[in-house]
Image (tube, rainbow, N blue to C red):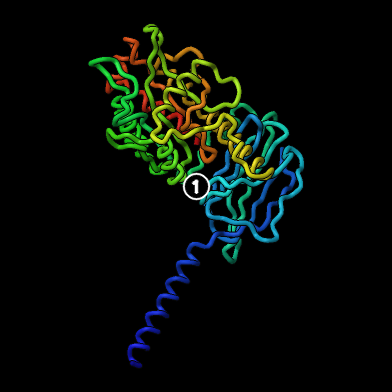
Amino acid sequence: MWVFKKIFYIIFYFCVIFDTEAAFSEDKNLVSKIRFSNSDNGIRIVIDVDNEFKYEIRPLKSPPRIVVDLQNVTFDDSFSFPNPVGIVKGVRFAKHSAEISRIVFDLNDSGNIQNRRTIKQSSGSKRKLSFEIISEDKISDSELRKTSNRRNYSIRKTIILDPGHGGKDPGTSYPREVSEKDIVLRFSRILKKNLSRNKNYRVYLTREDDRFVSLKDRVDFAKSKNADLFISIHADASSAKSTKGFSVYTLSNKGIDKEAEKLAAIENSYTESKIKYQSNYLKNALNPRDFYDFKTKLSQAQDDSYVFAGILIDRVEKKSALLKNPNRYAGFAVLKSTDFPSVLVELGFVTNDYDRKNLRSLNWLSSISYQFVDAINSYF
């Protein structure tokens, strides 16, 4: 009996050790302080963290702000945001995903980032993230292009490609020639292959073959992967055979044109569970704080989506005709997440002879995929 007890305690002892090690391995790094100081042309910001960490910094517009994403961190109990100074008119926090904490520096004017670096102290594990926010009117055109195009791959990016329709839902089609569900899956596979050459990207498809996936499952899949960008891929159709060209849809609460809303209603009708997406996305907020947090996250996702849509259109225009007013707005169900920027692209019209020929061409699909890759590289 004593032998069995001894064995039990030995096993228990090792379990405690391994559980403790696992718990410590999942500990988040502590952000203890954010400090402002004046620099020659703007404001220097220093963020103190108690250990090595990964980060991303990028400027955004409309409204002007600097976004800092920190991976696997939490904030010290004594932490507080500093008072605004200079070009910085406010500082706020947003939980971007399960792994990423976001600090947003709202600006009085458009700004950019210079002199970013991490500093390791001479002893201990503490790190400092230091960078400067410079007003754009103090930066020369050449410097502005250089800082705007600089990529920061400290954190790997997760990209979700969403081939529309599938299975029992064929999407739109042109009899005996093309089916939307097949075209978009083929293009998505090509795009995934080309994106995957960049080891800084993780790329997933919401469907790998000809199967039906509900709209809710597509969005849930993207959330489960902590998506940094969601691209839903479709082909269009029109009663006017002359209508052709590439377009991109993003979500907007205002100015949704009737044509786009009609298209959104058709796409959304395929959802298996007939989920009702309310036009006012804030009705589910439980209290004023929830309302503010939801609205802030939705606004950030919308702004980021619009930025990427503009970049993508600029790149694709080099290789494809564009639909009139190619940057459009609609209430597609897959665009309504607050967790990541999302766009829905229409590669072209299956009802137009010129577009249909392109959509069936492997060379054309490959050529357009490289424009997507270029746009995604520029966005990140």
Give residue 296's position: percent from left, percent from top: 63, 38
The residue lying at 65 percent from left, 40 percent from top is 291
Left or right, 137 with reference to 182: right
Residue 27 in sight from this viewpoint? yes
Q: Quadrant of residue 319?
A: top left
Badge 1: residue crowd in 10 Å (few <14, some 14–19, many ≥20): some
The amino acid marked with disc number 1 is Ser
Q: Quadrant of residue 209?
A: top left
Relative vertical location of residue 122 with respect to residue 202 in this rendering, above or below: below
Left or right, 83 with reference to 361: right
Give residue 96's position: percent from left, percent from top: 55, 45
Which of 24/48 is in front?
A: 24
The residue lying at 61 percent from left, 23 percent from top is 254
Give residue 88's position: percent from left, percent from top: 72, 40
Left or right, 146 with reference to 365: right
Give residue 357's position: percent from left, percent from top: 29, 14
Badge count: 1
Q: Which residue is mark 1?
A: 154
The residue lying at 42 percent from left, 72 percent from top is 18
